[in-house]
Amino acid sequence: MDDALVDALLVAAEDGGVDCDGLVATVDDSDGYVFAAGDERHHGVDEERFRELAREHPRYVGNWRFWAQETPPGDDRVAFLRWLEGAEDEPLPDRLNRLEDGVETTWGQLHVTVTLADSGAAAPASQYHRQYTLRHAEDVHGEAPVDSADLTDHTDPLDARELSKHDDRNRYRPLKTAPTLQRGWRFPDLDPSALVRAVECFYPATIPNWHREREGDLDVDHWRDTAERQTGIYDVVEELPREAVEWVAEACCVDSQCTKRREWQYDEGEALEADGGDGTYPCREPCSLVVAAARKWTILEGETERTYEFDLTPSEKHQLEELIDAVADGRVDEIREADVGDGANRYRARYLRAKRFDDEGNLCGVPTTDGDE
Amino acid sequence: MQALVIVAHGSHLNPGSSEPTFEHADTIRATGAFDEVREAFWKEEPHFREALRTVAADEVYVVPLFISEGYFTEEVIPRELRLEGWDVEDWESGDGVSASHATYAAADVEKDVHYVGPAGTHDAMSDVIVRRAESVTGDPDVGDGFGLAVVGHGTKRNEHSARAIEYHADRIDEMGRFDEVQALFMDEEPEVDDVTDYFESDDVVVVPLFVADGYHTQEDIPEDMGLTEDYRDGWETPATVDGQRIWYAGAVGTEPLMADVLLERAADAGADVGDAVEQVREQTRVSPSPADD
């Protein structure tokens, strides 16, 4: 171990002390030092002995150096990096052994592998750098995993902004946490700051909110809070009926639509029945997409129901239900060209239209009466 | 530590809307003037609501990449950032173009938040409009023999928006660089549709004061001016309309020098930006196009 590292540990011991993954280095009341590593503990040691002890425990000291000097500022970011390697779950020596093989975690659709950067490095100080590999979880463990050699490599974490912009069908993704992240890319070698930066670009603000929740101070804004705060064209969402808020949550905020876990409810003390999902990171208030959609639904819910009469065969009624299901579940593109057994098949839909729509597009020739006339 | 957070509108529908924000953020990031440079949006993520928690710095400069003072800069952004004690009077702007800066605590983070006026009303914005004229013509000395039109929404939509257009048009006119300078509007007199009526010069540069290219700048205005029958067919630059050459620049917010305005806003509010302003001004300078050699 180089002297500079031992010097740094001494300075840190005198300047507030060190307590990191089983390594304790601090100044004793009796004017000596305290040095502890794992189960071993020494009190009242002099500087020479302190230096000896530090050299005897390169894994503890090297690991401390990584956390003290190589991680980005921000408690939330450090907590995230520690969580990625299971730092709270097992003692250091075991953890380092595991890190040599790589520790894997997922964050939404992201897959992170943490490894010791260069476990064979000659200089002890660099043995405890962490190296992060970031990929799409489906490319690693999905039904059709992709060989790393076939992934496009990226080094700049800000490339994540571009990768997260469109899905695999090149459609714009206004909701960053939608489970539609495109595949086929890899960040093979990120340092801690770059890893955090890339995750922040893929899933903005998920790290600070996840951290706040772990610390017990997530500031949740429920539906009522959010709706009442709106002004301008969104002012109307306050008028959305109570039961419609359930439908909004069921439509927009389930795992199939968003990787966040919905923590906001109708109001403080009044939960929504819809499932908030199992996401790793929380959703702390209705997002701008939900508010914009809720505005549309508020306007639509302002209409009065009326009775229409249609003549449909039982199969045709069922087909309308299948069509709505197919669109709602994003299944339309999966329906095979000749699968006329599926009610949402294009030919089936075209046949129904040919048979049941009049020239104005009215179902069964029944006009849509506008407004409340 | 100090952080810069650029707040912009963004879009649920148009992926290009946030591009200028990211580009200017990258330019400023490269100067190293701030420990952190982040972007936040009304319609994208991170939302304004969560902008302040995305930075570790305890001094945060929030610069709105908006064109004018008004609903967003005075009401929506301060509310969504949870600025405690926000009062538009603190900006000391009574005329719609003089908003400066003020410092607040925010309810959800322990930071000093320096909230500054919109990019669009800073004096340096006049330089960006001129620079836009240079880049669309490929001539760093453009001016002689040229007219310049600064285009915005009309007062029907936002009184302060029109005020910002007129303010910069007047400032540029006073520079004496262009033969003629005129403020034009989309939905009121003087209208951009009649651009050629307002200029005698053979060449007119038209610069819309918008943050990003979108429906107005890429569909509406080019068709209204008669640059093209159908925006999907594109248009020439310059395009000849009624015998005059119209050099249509597209949204001023896409001009790289825009990064300078964001920096200057933060510097005015007390950010230590070193020589970043000079760096950005130099790096984004327009070279003469080969055709002029």
Image: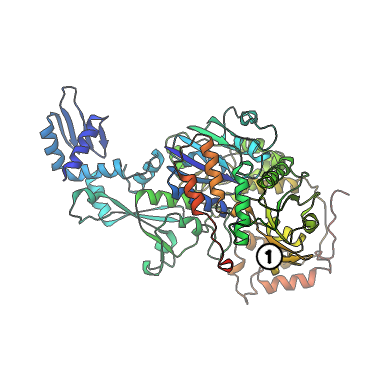
Q: Position of residue B214 (x, y in %)?
A: 66, 57
Which residue sits at x=41%, y=59%?
Answer: A135
Q: Position of residue A299 (x, y in %)?
A: 75, 46
Image check: B25 left or right of A86?
Answer: right
Amino acid type shown at disc 1: Pro
Label 1: few (<14), some (14–19) or many (≥20) C-alpha neighbours in 10 Å: some
Q: How is the image coloured?
A: rainbow
The answer to whether any part of residue B127 appears in the image is yes
Front-most of residues B287 and A63: B287
Residue A146 sits above or below residue A14 on the image: below
Quadrant into which the N terminus of chain B falls: top left
Which residue sits at x=75%, y=62%?
Answer: B223
Q: Position of residue A113 (x, y in %)?
A: 35, 55
Q: Residue furthest right?
A: A373
Q: Quadrant of residue B75?
A: top right
Image check: B239 left or right of B84?
Answer: right
Q: Position of residue A280 (x, y in %)?
A: 45, 47
Front-most of residues A259 and A206: A206
Q: Which residue is mark 1?
A: B238
Q: Quadrant of residue A237?
A: top right
